[in-house]
Amino acid sequence: HDAEAVVLAHQPGKGKHIGRLGALAVQLADGTEFSVGTGFSDAERAAPPAVGSAITFRYQELSDGGVPRFPSFVRVSSPPATIQPSTKASANIPPRKPTAANEAPAATGKSRRFEFVEGKSSKFWEIAISDCDVTVHYGRIGTNGQSNIKTLADAAAAQKFAEKLIAEKTGKGYLEV
């Protein structure tokens, strides 16, 4: 099957793709979000489709949840598709006001640090927003750890994404330090 989706973000590459595109976070017209990480040439990984552009991808079938299985990049759609990024949340539901525990950092690059210490587990997790980029740094306390950067469509999307990640971590028992 072939379909079109809008590019929401670029996910960094790992292994031989460090410093290049690893996958595209994309969204279907119905709001379904998923990643497309295969089918790219080396040139396409070095200069990936822009956030907000539409791509054509192939897939084998839809999962029970309606997500395309084994999506593979084909091309940037030409002419651009009329798919508009949407949110799955109902427009009638007001946005949740962040609380002190899950409030995202301001878009100034200020980072927030969380730690999880229990039994033999001793981990840290930090998050920072800079414009459209959300940087997450994590690892075992006392090590350098590792970092991931996700670029989103705009600062508001970056803020929302950071809030979601913070809520997940605090839900798992991480405490802000």
Image (spheres, rainbow, N blue to C red):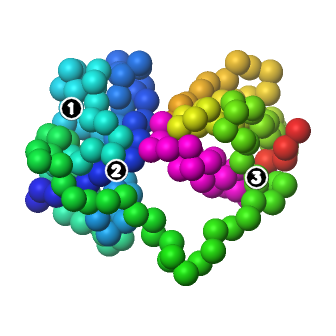
Question: Residue at horizontal 78%, vertical 37%?
Answer: 112
Q: List x then y, in percent, for residue 2.
A: 12, 56
The residue under label 2 is 26
User: Is the magenta region chiefly helix, strand or loop?
Assistant: helix
Question: Residue at horizontal 22%, vertical 59%?
Answer: 82
Crowding at dot 3, Cα within 10 Å, few <14 / some 14-19 / many 20+, comes out as some
The residue under label 3 is 103
Crowding at dot 2, Cα within 10 Å, few <14 / some 14-19 / many 20+, comes out as many
The residue under label 1 is 40
Residue type pointed to by label 2: Val
- In three-dimensional space, the C-alpha distance between marks 3 and 1, rounded to whole angstroms, equals 36 Å
Residue type pointed to by label 3: Glu
Question: Residue at horizontal 30%, vertical 51%?
Answer: 6
Among numbered discs 2 and 1, the one appearing first in the sequence: 2
- In three-dimensional space, the C-alpha distance between marks 2 and 1, rounded to whole angstroms, equals 15 Å
Q: What stretch is highlighted in magenta?
A: 151-173
The front one of 122 and 114 is: 114
Res. 113 in view? yes
The front one of 52 and 18 is: 52
Residue type pointed to by label 1: Phe
- As drawn, is 128 to the left or to the right of 33? right
Among numbered discs 3 and 1, the one appearing first in the sequence: 1
SS at mark 2 in the image: strand
Q: Are marks 2 and 1 in contact (CB under 8 Å)?
A: no
Image quadrant containing the C terminus: top right
SS at mark 3 in the image: loop
In the rendered structure, does residue 171 fall within the stretch colored magenta?
yes
Q: List x then y, in percent, for residue 125.
A: 72, 36
